[in-house]
Amino acid sequence: MGEVFVSTVHPALGRLYWVYTSNADCNYPDHYSLTDWSELATRFPKGWRDHQYYHWKHRSHISQVFEPEDPYGDYFEQYEEEEAGGVLEQRLSGLLANLQEKSGQTVEEFRHWMFRATWVDVPALCIVENCAYG
């Protein structure tokens, strides 16, 4: 059974990948992110979208990346007071902040692009240490 990365191509950043870290063993929330390094990308089993567990767990990956209520996430929202009402301030940190800065987009433009992007499965390259040879 092969493995795939979930990926898209950004016009300024090039190929981007999903990153998922399960924290079930330490009772912390799982972490969802994005990267431009395939070495950090999460490998999924080929056909993961047809597998009930994987599809359920990862169907909302981008929403999880930009979940403002995640205290361990890299996306934050805060309303700033103004005379006419509150103004939403959006901030990023970590890998997301680095990608957004390199993209040349505002946080809002970057976030919207990620939601509109077509995320497809691409074959994961076989790294010698991770390959089984018969």
Image (spheres, helix red, strand yellow):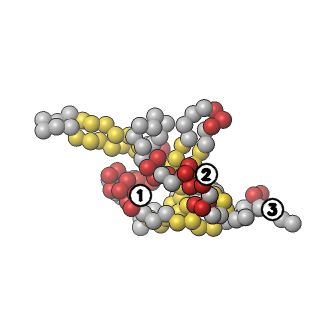
Label 1 neighbour load within 10 Å: few <14, some 14-19, many 20+: some
Rendering coords of residue 44 (x, y %): 63, 57
Amino acid residing under circle 2: Tyr
Q: Are marks 2 and 3 in contact (CB under 8 Å)?
A: no
Is residue 40 in view from this perspective?
no
Q: Residue 56 location in percent, x, y? A: 55, 51
Nearest to the observer: residue 45 or residue 7:
45
Residue 79 seen in the figure: yes
Q: Secondary structure at mark 3?
A: loop
Q: CA distance from mark 2 to mark 3?
A: 25 Å
Q: Earlier in the sequence, mark 2 or mark 1?
A: 2
Q: Position of residue 55 (x, y in %)?
A: 56, 55
Residue 110 versus residue 27: which sits nearer the camera? 27
Kindly identify the residue that appears in the image at 54 percent across and 43 percent down: 31
Residue bearing mark 3: 132
Q: Earlier in the sequence, mark 1 or mark 3?
A: 1
Residue matched to label 1: 114
Bin the neighbour count of mark 2 within 10 Å (Cα to Cα): few under 14, some 14-19, many 20 and up: few
